[in-house]
Amino acid sequence: MVSFCTEKDSWGSRFIIFTVPLPDQPPVFMSMKVPKCGSERSGIVIVDSEKFLQLWRNEPYSIHRAAANGNPQTWPIDYKYSEAVKGFSYGYDNPVPLAFVSHGTATRTIVSYKILWFGKREFHESFHYVGFTNGVTRTIWLLSQGCKAFPIECEMPGARELHRTAAMPGTPFYTIGELAKVASSVSVQR
């Protein structure tokens, strides 16, 4: 399971460091800076990889549609993939920043036609999706490594909905401020 703690850098800034397990290989490390103010503007969600990927594939306006609909065989072909490989290789001393997403809800129209009665019916269906602000390459790298769960930063109020729709079962929801308080009392396993 994903774990976390806090660290300070040489300038006194606080960071939350996440240990992200991977199957059949050592864990990788991700981080986020704890802002001095505004720590309630975003939430942190430990997402279930499969649920998250489905939400990303639902995104109706995506410029990253090819990456969202990729798979572990196609993601390594991405032109920035080698940057993620390098970034994750630095380990605990230089963790990779969390990806940042927004959560939304949209409606699609489904049309069905009756053949014998020559009519048409329309249904309107609401669905959830996520869109990336940054972190696509980091995310496809984690997915291509078989990562089952990883932390994501999401703007409020969508972060609570992302937790409801895609969180790893049994993981709590935290704003950045709440997580910083919890993390300051925890030590990470390197």
Image (cartoon, rainbow, N blue to C red):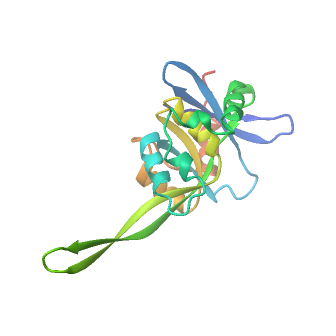
- Residue at image position (56%, 41%) is 151
Question: Going by the image, does 92 lie left or right of 130?
Answer: right
Could you say which is closer to the camera, residue 146 or residue 33? Answer: 146
Question: Going by the image, does 3 lie left or right of 34?
Answer: left
x and y percent of residue 123 in the render?
30, 73
Which quarter of the figure has residue 78?
Answer: top right
Could you say which is closer to the camera, residue 134 or residue 91? Answer: 134
Above or below residue 159? Residue 74 is above
x and y percent of residue 38 in the render?
70, 59
Above or below residue 134? Residue 148 is above
x and y percent of residue 26 in the render?
57, 19
Question: Going by the image, does 8 lie left or right of 46?
Answer: right
Quarter of the figure with the C terminus: top right
Above or below residue 12? Residue 61 is below
Question: Going by the image, does 15 lie left or right of 127?
Answer: right
x and y percent of residue 71 in the render?
48, 38
- Residue at image position (42%, 54%) is 164
Which quarter of the figure has residue 32?
Answer: top right
- Residue at image position (50%, 42%) is 70
Could you say which is closer to the camera, residue 84 or residue 166? Answer: 84
Above or below residue 95? Residue 176 is below
Query: Across the whole image, how many numbered discs are drawn on residues?
Result: 0
- Residue furthest to the right in view is 11
